[in-house]
Image (cartoon, helix red, strand yellow):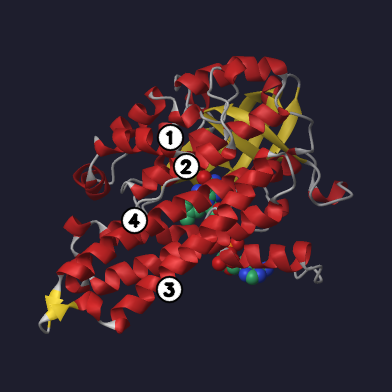
Amino acid sequence: MKHTDKYSDIRDAVRDLCKEFPDEYHRKIDEQRGYPEAFVNALTKAGWLAALIPEEFGGSGLGLAEASVIMEEINRSGGNSGACHGQMYNMGTLLRHGSQAQKAKYLPKIATGELRLQSMGVTEPTTGTDTTKIKTTAVKKGDRYVVNGQKVWISRIQHSDLMILLARTTPLADVKKKSEGMSIFIVDLRDAIGKGLAVRPILNMVNHETNELFFENLEIPAENLIGEEGQGFKYILDGLNAERTLIAAECIGDGYWFIDRVTKYVKERVVFGRPIGQNQGVQFPIAESYIELEAANLMRWKACELFDACQPCGEQANMAKYLAAKASWEAANACLQFHGGFGFACEYDIERKFRETRLYQVAPISTNLILSYVAEHVLGLPRSF
Ligand SMILES: Cc1cc2nc3c(=O)[nH]c(=O)nc-3n(C[C@H](O)[C@H](O)[C@H](O)COP(=O)(O)OP(=O)(O)OC[C@H]3O[C@@H](n4cnc5c(N)ncnc54)[C@H](O)[C@@H]3O)c2cc1C
């Protein structure tokens, strides 16, 4: 499948870079449970991860549409943007809500890659998706905040210099609305680890560097508070539309990768004296997932268009993520199924991509939570939780 669109310059350039990191590279990293350092460095050096940083801070000031093409192409090439997508979108919180001094201090260095802001600490073990109940607290003491609590599934900590942290600054019992009283901070991980922050890596189904974090009297300078105290939850929500849309594009990249692979294979693989792709039982699931992928892609472009025009796009960003995660998973299933036994052999890369794309129905937001968002906020149904 060769698509042409107005982003072909970006597509070609990212593809060329990705070609230097073929399947064997990603397979080996997966096998070793390693981090694709050389790949991420090459993307950083070429400026791709700074796409959304405005030019005045050293980035390329591109729109979400262009940024989404970069993520799509990484996944479409057989790589996994999960290793580095945080560097592209986590800085959005700082860009939108940080002070001029914070932006001037951090953004140019994030743009060059001198600083990695790859991590965002929101999820907690006892509260899960019910974010307003988080128990991690940040208490102001003079010119510092003192943080205590625990986070789980916090990604890329070992490959990041900075983390955006959500913590409660006013107890839940003392706020009018449960979404108030939480604040966000920039945590300099280089100062924090071993001095109030302990990190426990979580081995998981995907080669995704993710961790449990334990905060015990971690001190953060008060100047690292982003925006107004108590408004942190709102700031995090503001960044989600970009994140959802970029992840949708990654799923779309995965989906095309699966469809390309399976289409080629079923034309070549001969069983019972004919290519397996001649059987409708084989054709239909592939055709169906392709149709669903194309539809998801339209919703992704809609979300990008609205976002880049500064229009509300929560509905479209959530729906794009839902549709794309589902379509890439269907494509993954068809690809695995029609490779028969070979789909399970690591050297075909299908089982790796199959694991990687499955994650997106759970994180960064689960499909159920998207359904409840649409039910409540789009269709006006009563809140279910
Ligand atoms: C590999 C990985 C990387 C991650 N990286 C990060 C990260 O960098 N930073 C971060 O903060 N978090 C991260 N997460 C956490 C991720 O965002 C959460 O796992 C996800 O939001 C779901 O939360 P939970 O695991 O606590 O599930 P739970 O909230 O316990 O939910 C479990 C299941 O129940 C369903 N459910 C819960 N409530 C309802 C309801 N009311 N109605 C219907 N269904 C419901 C959910 O949809 C879900 O399927 C990561 C997770 C993984 C697996």
Among numbered discs 2 and 3, the one appearing first in the sequence: 2
Among numbered discs 3 and 4, the one appearing first in the sequence: 4
Quarter the C terminus occupies: bottom right
Q: Secondary structure at mark 3?
A: helix
In whole angstroms, how far apart are the C-alphas of marks 2 and 4? 16 Å
Q: Quadrant of residue 355?
A: bottom left
Q: Which residue is mark 1?
A: 10
Q: Is residue 145 visible?
A: no
Q: Which residue is mark 2?
A: 69
Residue at 69 percent across and 57 percent down: it is 315
Among numbered discs 2 and 1, the one appearing first in the sequence: 1
- Quadrant of picture, ligand 1: bottom right
Numbered circle sitting on residue 288: 3
Among numbered discs 2 and 4, the one appearing first in the sequence: 4
Q: Is residue 361 above or below residue 148?
A: below
Q: Is residue 276 visible?
A: yes
In front: mark 3 or mark 4?
Answer: 4
Task: Tell which residue pokes out farthest to the right in this image.
Answer: 176
**159 left or right of 150?**
left
The answer to whether the residues at label 2 and label 1 have Cβ atoms under 8 Å apart is yes
Among numbered discs 3 and 1, the one appearing first in the sequence: 1
In this view of the protein, which residue sits in the foreground, 161 or 247?
247
The kind of residue on which mark 1 rests is Ile
